[in-house]
Image (cartoon, rainbow, N blue to C red):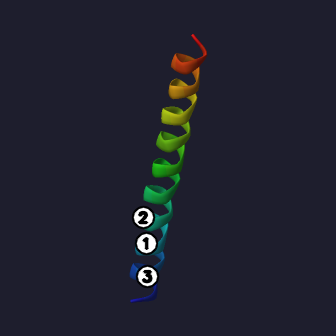
Amino acid sequence: MCRRIIKCSFFFLLIHFTKTVLGMQQHSTAAIFSYH
């Protein structure tokens, strides 16, 4: 049970990290397009 909780929390962190990275990439590409 404890191991499962750790796995779920790790999965949640992974999703959160991926969303943050994708959001940053979207912002940077938008900035580049608006700059040009």
At label 3, the amino acid type is: Ile
At label 1, the amino acid type is: Lys
Q: Give the CA distance from mark 1 to mark 2.
A: 6 Å
Instruction: Say which of marks 1 and 2 sits in front.
Output: 2
Q: Give the CA distance from mark 2 to mark 3.
A: 10 Å
Cβ atoms at labels 1 and 2 below 8 Å apart: yes
Q: Which residue is mark 2?
A: 11
- Percent position (x, y) of residue 15? 43, 57
Residue at coordinates 46% horizontally, 50% vertically from top-left? 19
Q: Which residue is mark 1?
A: 7
Residue at coordinates 48% horizontally, 59% vertically from top-left? 16
Residue at coordinates 58% horizontally, 26% vertically from top-left? 31
- Give residue 5's mark: 3
Which residue sits furthest bottom? 1
Question: Label 2's element?
Answer: helix
Question: Label 3's element?
Answer: helix
Vertical comparison of 26 with 10: above or below = above
Neighbour tally class for label 2: few under 14, some 14-19, many 20 plus, Cα within 10 Å: few
Q: Give the CA distance from mark 3 to mark 1.
A: 5 Å
As drawn, is 27 to the left or to the right of 2? right
- Percent position (x, y) of residue 10? 48, 67
Cβ atoms at labels 3 and 1 below 8 Å apart: yes
Question: Label 1's element?
Answer: helix
